[in-house]
Image (tube, rainbow, N blue to C red):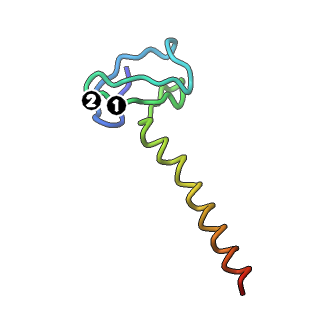
Amino acid sequence: MVTCPVCDGNIDVEEEDVDEGDTVSCDECGAELKVLSKDPLELQSAEELEEDEDEPGLADDDEDEEEEEHDWK
């Protein structure tokens, strides 16, 4: 059994039944959770993971803008 990182509810998932990268749902709050590791079983909100993946792209865009400004000088 593992704890939901969103609502702290108990999720009955066996390590043998999932693989890293799989998505499971919390029965209590309905959150979609990604399996980060199996030993120990660790879950993270799929929504938070998507937000984390989007952030580095924003930083890259800022760097491009700075380079463009520098080219004008």
Q: Is residue 73 left or right of residue 56?
A: right
Residue 29: where, in percent of width, then height?
Answer: 27, 29
Is the residue under label 1 in contact with that under label 2 (CB below 8 Å)? yes
Amino acid on which the number 2 mark rests in the picture: Cys
Look at 52% across and 12% down and name the residue there.
Answer: 16
Question: What label does residue 29 carry, if any?
Answer: 2
Q: Where on the picture, by quarter, is residue 71?
A: bottom right
Q: Residue furthest front?
A: 72
Q: Residue furthest left?
A: 28
User: Badge 1 is on which residue?
Assistant: 31
Look at 51% across and 17% down and name the residue there.
Answer: 18
Question: What quarter of the picture does the N terminus occupy?
Answer: top left
Residue 59: where, in percent of width, then height?
Answer: 58, 62
User: Element at badge 1?
Assistant: loop
Distance from disc 2 to disc 1, alpha carbons, whole Å, reads: 6 Å
Look at 44% across and 14% down and name the residue there.
Answer: 14
Residue 27: where, in percent of width, then height?
Answer: 29, 21
Q: Residue furthest top?
A: 17
Residue 26: where, in percent of width, then height?
Answer: 33, 25
Q: Residue furthest bottom?
A: 73
Crowd tier of the residue under label 2, counting other residues whose Cα lies within 10 Å: few below 14, some 14–19, many 20 or above: few
